[in-house]
Image (spheres, grey):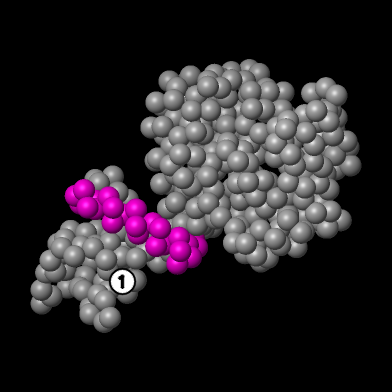
Amino acid sequence: MLYAFYGADGRSAATHAALAAAHALTTAARPATLLRITERGQGLARIPETMPEALCVVEAEPGDLVTFDDPEDLIRQARATARDVVLDLPLSWLPYRSLREAAALSVVVVGPGAMEERLAAFALGQCGEQVISGRAAADQASGVGPEPGSAAPVWLLGAGRAGGGPDATRFEQTMRPLLRRAGAGDGCRFLPVALPAPTRSETHAVAAGHPLAGTVRQGMLLLAAIEVAAQDPFVASLDSGRFARALGLDPEMPVTPDERRLCDRLRDLADALEALEQGGPAPEEMARAPLMESWSFLSGRTRVLAGVSFGHPTIASGRPTLTSDVFATDGRTWARTLSRLYRLGTPAEATPAAGLQ
């Protein structure tokens, strides 16, 4: 199989995704070739040649390639030896239809910053119809198949996001309006996973060919999502429930767990508190927040929320739950803890309401 990752800005996120997927292939006993192309004059982040024997890494600048046929020749050679191929490409190569037609799936990797999201949306808008499915929006709704010869749509992967499935959902909800305003319409699809930013030790290990256990787990999950999407790249959407069913799991099972470290949670909390200063949570944020029933605030060093949670990304619905510290609440309808926003349902008996913190 051939999988193509396109980097929107800086390329580090796409290179991380490509390396994680390539290592996942070798972990699954599938020899792979990683072909990395950089823009002319940008130099190469030479990956040390200490990779596993099953992983062949090739890096080149366009100036090293006599014609555009050269990368295609490398792909043919890899396929002739029954190797999977992973491409790490600059976004400027996205309009090359021949590569996207050859790829089982083409993935644009988008970093976590608001500017990175806008830059990616603008770039995809500039590509226009070249990267959007040949199927019209009305045909997508009616289930009509793609036009003959149409290239599969581009799929987007949110990188630098450790919140699992909820982060993947937030990424899609953020990108959809940006893509429409940029002229890319609704042609892009979204993977049901997010890729956490690697720590310094994880980065050194994956570049040296010896990925840590966490990186292997993330790579295997990413590879699974890509291969499920590649089964029908024209599908209108691939949510977490459909992804779980494709893996033979319970659709209610949290396949993509929240793996945020404390620093990630604090950054998310800072963004949330800044937004709360402008008023309560937005209606769309409340709609996707887990619900806490029989809730009460408990006091320790700081208050925490106790109750029975429903719709939590990592806790089965109906389970008693004790949250992390509560940083803001209106005492009636919502509470923002260190980790996430909660909708407040029915309070526990004899619990005095809390004022806004």
Which residue occupies the foreground of this view, 112 or 229? 112
Query: Quick check: 165 left or right of 231?
Result: left
Residue that mark 1 sits on: 325
**Which secondary structure is most common in the magenta stretch?**
helix
Q: Position of residue 91 (x, y in %)?
A: 62, 31
Residue 211 left/right relative to 339: right
Q: Quadrant of the C terminus?
A: bottom left
Q: Quadrant of residue 200?
A: bottom right
Q: Position of residue 283 (x, y in %)?
A: 24, 45
Three-letter residue code for mark 1:
Asp
Taking 310 as reference, is 71 left or right? right
Magenta-highlighted residues: 257-281
Locate residue 33, reporting x and y percent. 80, 44
User: Tag 1, which secondary structure?
Assistant: strand
> For the residue carrying disc 1, how many other residues have a C-alpha within 10 Å: few (<14), some (14-19), or many (20+)?
some
Q: Is residue 341 visible?
A: yes
Q: On screen, 115 above or below 246?
A: above
The answer to which quarter of the image holds residue 52 is bottom right
Residue 319 vertical position relative to residue 76 in the rendered view, above or below? below
Q: Position of residue 345 (x, y in %)?
A: 20, 62
Q: Residue at x 32, y 51 (%)?
A: 288
